[in-house]
Image (cartoon, rainbow, N blue to C red):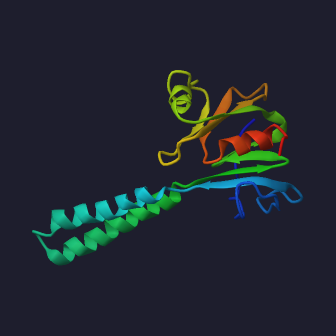
Amino acid sequence: MSHPASSSASPSEGPSGAHPSSAGQPGSELLYEEKLTAAWWMWLLVLFAGLVALVALAPIDTGAAVAAAVVVAGGTAVLLVVSSTSIVITDEFLQVGRARIERRFVGEAEAFRGDDVRRVRGPELDGRAFMNFRTSVGPVVRIRITDPVDPTPYWLTSTRHPERIVEILSGRD
């Protein structure tokens, strides 16, 4: 059964490195960790939001316009950072964002890129699935859930390295 995580994951050197985990499970080996952060081009939204506030308020009061631009740009930047999620795989659990499940309930994983992403996120999507999509991360991985009491058939999450996740979850790492 999937459960929200109680702690955030520790930093890793890369998507394929194996490191001791300090993610709340002493003794479990960290097999994979990926932070799904905003792409560089999404940071242009921060500038655009600040510019819109500046232009909208500049005719009224220049000081208020500058202050509003800083607040709006800062708020947008905070939203981008806070909306980042992580994928963490250890030998004991899989965690995507705040959802966590024991590895013994993790079934087959499949990687999707290109047009296949549109298909699995659209016409083939099961509404009961756990979804973790990021607009700036194109590829996805679908991970079957085998827990008989969990109504969630699979997790579908964006990732920059779907093939690596499939390798690790299928034991081919």
> Residue 153, image x and y in percent?
68, 26
Q: Is residue 3 visible?
A: no
Q: Is residue 48 above or below residue 4?
A: below
Quadrant of res 33: bottom right
- At 71% from the left edge and 47% from the top edge, which residue is drawn? 95
Which residue is at the far top?
A: 123
Quadrant of res 128: top right
> Residue 149, image x and y in percent?
76, 26
Q: Is residue 161 above or below residue 7?
A: above
Which residue is at the far front?
A: 114
Which residue is at the far left?
A: 59
Quarter in which the N terminus is drawn = top right
> Residue 26, image x and y in percent?
86, 60
Q: Is residue 75 visible?
A: yes
- At 60% from the left edge and 38% from the top edge, which residue is drawn? 140
- At 66% from the left edge and 54% from the top edge, which residue is drawn? 34
Pick whichever, 144 or 159, lies toward us.
159
> Residue 90, image x and y in percent?
81, 50
Q: Is residue 167 above or below residue 31?
A: above
Q: Is residue 95 left or right of residue 70?
A: right
